[in-house]
Amino acid sequence: MRNYRSSYPTTWRIMDVFEKAFAAIWPKGRGKYTPYLMLTPAIVLVGTLVVGLLYIGDSSLRTLDRSTFQFSDYWTLENYTRAFSESFTATIIWRSLLGAMIVTVVTLCLAFPYAYIMVRTPKAVLRKFLLIALFLPFFIGQVVRAYGWLIILGNQGMVNDVLGLVGVEPLRLLFNYPAVLFGLVQYMLPFAVLMLAPAMTAIPEEIEAAAGSLGASWIKTMTHVVIPMARPGLVGAGLVVLTLSLTDFAMPAILGGGSQDFIANAIYDQFFRTSDQGFGASLAIILIALGSVLVGVIFTVFGAGTLELGSTDK
């Protein structure tokens, strides 16, 4: 007869210990409360965020006295009036919004074929290579990648060195708006591909084959079959890329060189450089409101895509 201890895996014995300990702490009679217990960490996190948002809202209604560097004891809309009356606020809002939309469109245009090839390729080697190339950037922080582009695209960088070999004068590839957009696109691309890949996988290959057998060209199959069926993935990826681009700080700060700031950079400046936390808080509230409106409009027009939970069918 086999020894009980040798036939019963160690991992199972460890799980039994945990199960007995949990049963002692949380008896079976309280099982109906288990779902609420599991929600506790999320409730605490959301509650912390709400408290922080209330604090930011309170700060946005208090002005800074430049003579004493003390904040007012009363609420006022002066910070918001100043934000909407100064031209620089309109400039950074428009720059952030336009940049986020451009980055979203370009990223989706690049991510779609990448995800399609990665999912549909019959070659395992190519699929593994695309997966490795996709996940590799996640092991390199955004700031590190941005500084890497400084080395590559700088006046003395690799690109200008190559151009110099063919007699082309050095180009100003950094500290401008296109450089910021380029940095954001290469940063957002893996996120978009990861959200598009499941949507692509859910499209049966037989449907594409059927469209081809009925005389549809590859282009018509893509535009009339694949893209419409991949719409949930496109919407979900677009939402993620749009919100992350709109609130990004590192790329405008590093690749923009301080001349192409987004809203997040302006908030940082007000909090930590000018110490006007009230005005910085008002910009933060404006950013939150702008992002919420954009997401609400997209939800209304296109739906939530892959971010939608459950079924909406009645």
Image (spheres, rainbow, N blue to C red):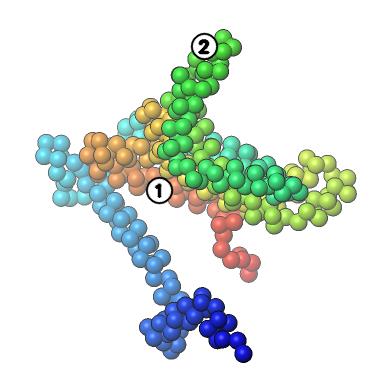
Q: Residue at x 23, y 35 (%)?
A: 274
Q: How many marks?
A: 2
Identity, as a three-letter code, of the amino acid under mark 1: Ala
Q: Is residue 279 visible?
A: no
Q: Is residue 92 left or right of residue 1?
A: left
- Distance (Cα) linking label 2 and label 1: 45 Å
Residue depicted at 70% across the width and 46% down the height:
125
| Towards the viewer: 165 or 31 | 165
Please tell me in which quadrant of the rendered image residue 257 appears.
top left
Query: Camera-side residue: 28 or 60?
Result: 28
Secondary structure type for disc 1: helix
254 displayed left or right of 129: left
Q: Could you tell me if residue 125 is visible in this image?
A: yes
- Label drawn at residue 168: none
Dot 2: few (<14), some (14–19), or many (≥20) neighbours within 10 Å?
A: few
Above/below status of 221 relative to 12: above
Q: Position of residue 239 (x, y in %)?
A: 53, 48
Q: What residue do we see at 76% from left, 49% from top? A: 122
Horizontal and vertical percent position of residue 121: 74, 47
Q: Which mark is residue 169?
A: 2
Residue 314, quarter of the rendered image:
bottom right
Residue that badge 1 annotates? 289
The amino acid pointed to by label 2 is: Glu
Could you say whether the residue bearing mark 2 is in a helix, strand or loop?
loop
Q: Residues within 10 Å of mark 1 (few under 14, many from 20)?
A: few
